[in-house]
Image: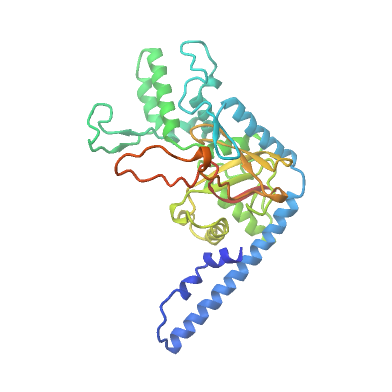
């Protein structure tokens, strides 16, 4: 943790500068900055030590009724959707219903129920977040001349009308069957083109009975991630908050059903460890929300913890276009294993012949669970 926080405050930049003669002013500035960095390091270390103590005290307790409801709601949605299953080696062993499909059994013209339509299930999550305004919040992406040109090198530009605009256009069609088909096609396109993983989390938490005053329901994970960090900062300062979740170090905290685990997908932080990313978010709390840098994120609900086998089952939405359950590895003490690494060796070795000029496959990762996990949002 100490080394990671040192990297976060960039003290190493000073030591990497080329040696040169320095005057008194330069030496004084270097000494002052080094002292500031050491002070920042001590402050960060003290902060996360207090946070960890609070997280450990809560993790030592059995999950409460709210946590159980959140976990059960996530499980219910997975079963209802019938999505994918990924094992603890990060291999997808069951491919289920996806967002774009009409019916889980591809039943053709046979009667079905709306709950068996993948896109309808996803619209349920959006409607829980935005109500009747949901179509206006979703875009349907098109490409100019894409439906008419047969030239793969034809240069084009994106078209991004909202689903609401397409629904209004469909309503002008007089034939009722054609009108309904056009409306559903617009919604299905919107579901495919608009990321919905945060809408899924918001739906699960809301259905479990959490009020808007306790959770920032949003179409972006970062909204409630930064919110949870603010709760942890307030607790360290001795202040009270009515929010449901706090931010805990993910690799040193025992997860419980109802907690939320998150990873980040920022290219500029791909090589940073979880402690560095958490400290960066903490520093950004007091700044402009639009300037926050950890924006590409994904979160899953902890649905179950198998203490005997040291495994965790997490459920998330829009994971390979479905509601998907992952089986993840825990360390000793039932703490989350940040490294869900699985090498491409033995039967998993990648031997597919490559085309001339094709970039060779590195064959270093063969786990769909191997992500940049960085924070556990703990139900308080």
Q: Is residue 277 above or below residue 165?
A: below
Residue found at the very far top of the displayed protein? 110
Of residue 143 and residue 291, the one placed in the foreground of this image is 143
Q: Residue at x 49, y 85 (%)?
A: 28
Quarter in which the N terminus is drawn = bottom right
Number of marks present in the image shown: 0
Q: Residue at x 55, y 31 (%)?
A: 93
Q: Is residue 96 above or below residue 267?
A: above
Q: Is residue 159 left or right of residue 369?
A: left
Of residue 83 and residue 16, the one placed in the foreground of this image is 16
Image x and y of residue 32, in percent: 52, 80
Of residue 109 and residue 159, the one placed in the foreground of this image is 109
Image x and y of residue 233, in percent: 63, 59
Residue found at the very far right of the displayed protein? 61
- The answer to whether residue 33 is seen in the rendering is yes
Task: Give the colour scheme shown.
Answer: rainbow
Q: Residue at x 46, y 38 (%)?
A: 195
Tell me which corner region of the image, top left, top right, bottom left or bottom right, holds residue 291: bottom left
Image x and y of residue 154, in percent: 22, 35
Image x and y of residue 103, in percent: 50, 19
Q: Is residue 295 left or right of residue 201?
A: left
Q: Is residue 18 left or right of residue 95?
A: left
Q: Is residue 137 above or below residue 243?
A: above
- The answer to whether residue 239 is seen in the rendering is no
Residue found at the very far bottom of the displayed protein? 24
Q: Is residue 328 left or right of residue 218?
A: right
């Amino acid at each position: 943790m100490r080394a990671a926080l040192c990297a976060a405050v960039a003290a190493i930049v000073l030591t990497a500068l080329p040696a040169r003669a320095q005057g008194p002013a330069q030496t004084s500035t270097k000494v002052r900055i080094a002292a500031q960095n050491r002070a920042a390091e001590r402050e960060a270390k003290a902060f996360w030590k207090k946070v960890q103590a609070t997280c450990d005290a809560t993790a030592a307790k059995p999950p409460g009724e709210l946590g159980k409801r959140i976990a059960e709601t996530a499980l219910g949605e997975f079963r209802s959707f019938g999505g994918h299953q990924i094992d603890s080696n990060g291999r997808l062993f069951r491919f289920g219903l996806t967002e774009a499909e009409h019916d889980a059994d591809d039943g053709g013209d046979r009667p079905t129920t709306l709950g068996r339509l993948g896109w309808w299930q996803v619209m349920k999550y959006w409607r829980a977040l935005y109500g009747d305004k949901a179509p206006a919040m979703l875009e349907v992406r098109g490409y100019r001349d894409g439906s008419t040109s047969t030239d793969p090198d034809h240069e084009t530009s994106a078209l991004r009308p909202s689903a609401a605009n397409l629904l209004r256009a469909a309503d002008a069609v007089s034939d009722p069957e054609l009108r309904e088909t056009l409306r559903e096609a617009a919604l299905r396109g919107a579901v495919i083109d608009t990321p919905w993983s945060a809408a899924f989390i918001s739906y699960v938490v809301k259905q479990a009975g959490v009020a808007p005053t306790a959770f920032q329901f949003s179409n972006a994970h970062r909204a409630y991630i930064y919110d949870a960090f603010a709760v942890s900062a307030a607790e360290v300062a001795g202040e009270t908050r009515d929010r449901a979740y706090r931010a805990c170090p993910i690799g040193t905290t025992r997860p419980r059903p109802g907690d939320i685990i998150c990873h980040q997908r920022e290219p500029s932080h791909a090589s940073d460890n979880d402690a560095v990313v958490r400290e960066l978010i903490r520093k950004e709390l007091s700044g402009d929300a639009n300037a926050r840098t950890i924006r590409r994120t994904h979160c899953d609900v902890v649905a179950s913890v198998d203490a005997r086998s040291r495994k965790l089952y997490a459920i998330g939405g829009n994971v390979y276009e479905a509601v998907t359950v992952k089986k993840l590895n825990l360390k000793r003490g039932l703490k989350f294993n940040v490294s869900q690494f699985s090498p491409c060796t033995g039967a998993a070795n990648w031997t597919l012949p490559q085309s001339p000029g094709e970039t060779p496959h590195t064959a270093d990762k063969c786990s769909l669970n191997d992500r940049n996990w960085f924070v556990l949002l703990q139900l308080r």
